[in-house]
Image (spheres, coloured by chain):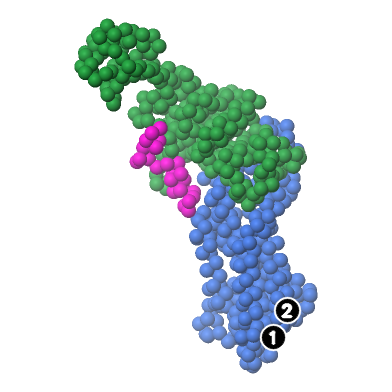
Chain colours: A green, B blue
Amino acid sequence: MSIIEVRDLVKVYKRGDVRAVDGISLDVEEGEIFGFLGPNGAGKTTTIRILTTLLQPTSGTASVDGIDVTEDPAAVRNAIGVALQEAGLDGLSTGREFLELQAALYAVADPRARAAELLATVGLEDAADRRIRTYSGGMQRRIDLAAALVHRPRVLFLDEPTTGLDPASRSRVWEEVRRLNEMGTTILLTTQYLEEADVLADRLAIIDAGAIVRRGTPAELKASVSEDLVTVVVPKGHKGKARDLLKGARTITRFEEVDGHFQIHVPDGASAMPSIVRAFADAGIKIPEISLRRPTLDDVFLRATGHRLEGDDGAAPDQPTDDLAMAGSERSAR
Amino acid sequence: MSAAAVQVDRSYLRHELMPLYRRNVRIWLRVPSAVLPPLFIPVFFLVVNSSALEGITALPIFENVNYVSFIIPVSLLMTVAAAGSGSGLALVQDIDTGYFDKMLLAPIRRSSILLSKLMMDATRAALQAMLVIAVGLTVGGSIATGIPGGLLLVAMAFLFGLAYSGISINIALRTGSPEATQASFVIFFPLVFLAPTFVPLEMLADWLQVVARFNPVSYVIIGLRALTVEGYVAGDLLGAFVAIGGLGLVTMTGAFRALAARAAQ
């Protein structure tokens, strides 16, 4: 049995009539890192809040570690560790006090020892006795991650664990996530960063407007786009000739001109490049530059949803973000 | 089962109430603005009124009571009410930072979140009440019922403080809005000033007497005042306890319901 099972999950926020989650089903297997990739407002946070018992689904079922989240939320809470997007830190407490309290609430045998151990794990021993409000963004994420681990949960939920972090802090969190996973923790993480999903996730679900639009391993997903992109810079004066040449070529899928370059879509870029160079040379066109790009998850996303994840600020403008959807239902003063 | 490796048997006190209570006290003491202002108003009120309004007791109806003793109860209610408003504010901050979610995610009874908070409010109300009484005695007041009556005074003030903090906790949990929660202090003004606050009930205008008789705070003031200027007047004390109990029942029922509603979305 899968460690996380979700079936036809729907969440409608009454206020604003937002269908934040619109029939999601998924399975996460024990020991994997499962990535939930999508723009703001796609329904990632809402799904996580349902799986972690903070929200009731409108319909559908979900279970974690074999326990139904609506039937026995208390048992689910005992089995999971959660680091939400809003870290939920207590700025007036020190890191040590915060972890000791957290360990006590989870009835850990020796809260002091466990807090000290975790402070070392996330590299915050030096800052342990400073108030959390003095921590940098990266340090706050790390203390929050430590707090999610006090009771050594088998399943860890990380909601956008690196949003807003600088690259160095980000890779530090990545390392920690990988290490936890290697120790056997199943991790479900949401992200709006393609790179993060690509680097960390064993399997991915791409979510848009409350529904899963694609799923698979990052490699499978990229292969499904099945196209490499060869970009050729053609000297002025040769463009017409190049156009004729490409129109006649049978091995390419299609081509377009972007910023004066020719972008040629081919099934397999590595084998196509030599023949492209040769064909141009035979036609008397000397190419100053040629490059190859493999498909990215962004291409997968574009293919699945019709819009790009990155570059246009993620969310479609007419969509409420998760935050806004929540503002309507539970947090009016944000 | 899954987390058994590091878990021992749970104890309600040791794993829920006490750690959360300690945290609440810690947060309270680390925010000077939550400690001092609730004390400032009532102390100011006591000190200024003790000199400015003393002449009023020459009126026959006062039967020559000490005016400071007469208004110590009002000061007590002010301090615990101001602190009670701050109680909801601390909660709203936890909601805002997401820390409240963290508590909801922990494998504890939801009621522990609120109970630990009320325990802190009680501690604070009792400490502040003692301080206000000490100031009152210093500026010339006295307590007719002596030390036992003084302790009863503190106990009643702190029970009233608990009941009153239920109002701001309600607003905090239902709105999640700092502004609305902060504004809950204004409720105190009609409660205190539509009551026999500065003069005995009989001296109030007729319409105000009618309003004051429907105001639970009137009975609390009358009961506390009996302890400071008269003695153990059974009827007055009973009235105060009934008023505090009634107010507390309403605000606490509302608060625990609001918590359940917020936790089960």
Left or right for A136, reference B26: left
- The relative height of residue A260 versus residue A158 in the rendered view (above or below) is above
Residue A290 at x, y = what percent? 35, 16
Q: Quadrant of residue B156?
A: bottom right
> Depth check: A231 or B64 in front?
A231
Q: Which amino acid does label 1 sit on?
A: Asn
Left or right for B58, reference A49: right
Residue A13 at x, y = what percent? 44, 44
**Is there any visible trace of residue A181 in the rendered image?**
yes
Q: Give yes or no for residue A325 being in the magenta stretch.
A: yes
Tell me, for residue A215, which label it has, or none: none
Q: Name the residue under label 1.
A: B66
Q: Residue at x 59, y 80 (%)?
A: B196
CA separation in Å, label 1 and label 2: 11 Å
Look at discs 1 and 2 and give the one toward the viewer.
2
Residue neighbourhood size for the residue with mark 2, other residues' Cα within 10 Å, grouped as few (<14), some (14–19), many (≥20): some
**Chain ID, mark 1:** B
Q: In which quarter of the image is residue A281?
A: top left
Q: What residue type is labelled 2?
A: Leu
- The relative height of residue A207 versus residue A321 in the rendered view (above or below) is above
Q: Magenta residues: mostly which secondary structure?
A: loop
Q: Which of marks 1 and 2 is nearer the N terminus?
A: 1
**Is there any visible trace of residue B242 in the rendered image?**
no
- The relative height of residue A125 versus residue A289 in the rendered view (above or below) is below
Q: Name the residue under label 2.
A: B137
Quadrant including the N terminus of chain A = top right
Q: Do the residues labelled 1 and 2 touch (CB within 8 Å)?
A: no
Residue A321 at x, y = what percent? 42, 41
Magenta-tinted stretch: A310-334
Q: Residue at x 37, y 18 (%)?
A: A291
Q: Residue at x 52, y 38 (%)?
A: A165
Q: Which residue is drawn at 54% across and 72% down?
A: B189
